[in-house]
Amino acid sequence: MIVVVEAHNAEKHARLLEQMFCLRARIFHDHLGWDVAVKDSKERDKYDDQNPVYIIYTNDDGCEVKGSLRLLPTTGPTLVADFFSDTLPDAADLMAPTIWECTRFCLDENVWQKDKEEIVFAATVLLVALGDLALREGSNRSSEISMPQRCTCGDVSGARWRYSAPPRDMGARSILACTRFPKRSSPGSRKS
């Protein structure tokens, strides 16, 4: 099940948000070794105070978080602007109401312990939900901070990736900034 959490319904989904912040602490701090702040077993940063949209993938009952991601409009503070701007000669191109930043994409450890098909399925569910939300809201690009494998593995939507900055070391893994563009229509293709 997918739950989209925004400022107007955050209180209703407080339990899922708490689980999500705990998951982020386990994945980004404990597992990946990133230098992120963890308080009370939860990972939060200043961007969580900017009224982001969270896409949360849960079990069928909607009570257990299996994965999540965070979306921010690029017209306000973002990780790309704050931490990668020195490597982005065209950083202004990444700021528009129709471009969102996707960060903190993570899957629960129980998903990672299953076979590759379950991992791909869980990641695909989140990406399809992201694409669906983007279509409904009129977003046409996303930027993200990710491990290089994430940007090279492609996308179920057929989107193109552009590396916006060279990889940087962060804890035990390298990360990079990349931008996802919608797949261009080929001549003769139907537009919907």
Image: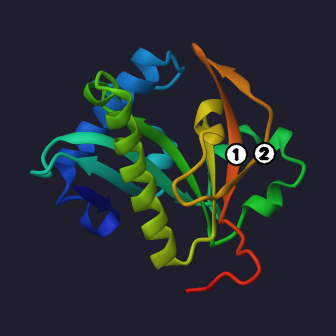
Mark 1: amino acid: Cys
Left or right: 88 with respect to 84? right
Label disc, if present, on residue 164 of the rendered structure? 2
Label 1 with label 2: CB-CB less than 8 Å: yes
Left or right: 31 with respect to 3? right
**Residue 159 picture location, percent across and down:** 64, 58
Q: Looking at the image, which is closer to me, 60 or 64?
A: 60
Could you classify mark 1 by the number of other residues whose Cα lies within 10 Å: few (under 14), some (14-19), or many (20 or more)?
many
Q: Looking at the image, which is closer to me, 182 or 178?
A: 182
Q: Looking at the image, which is closer to me, 94 or 130?
A: 130
Alpha carbon distance from label 1 to label 2: 5 Å
Residue 38 lies in what quarter of the image?
top left
Residue lying furthest front in this view? 188
- Which residue does the numbered mark 1 point to in the structure image? 178
Label disc, if present, on residue 1 of the rendered structure? none
Name the residue rendered at 41%, 43% in the picture. Answer: 123
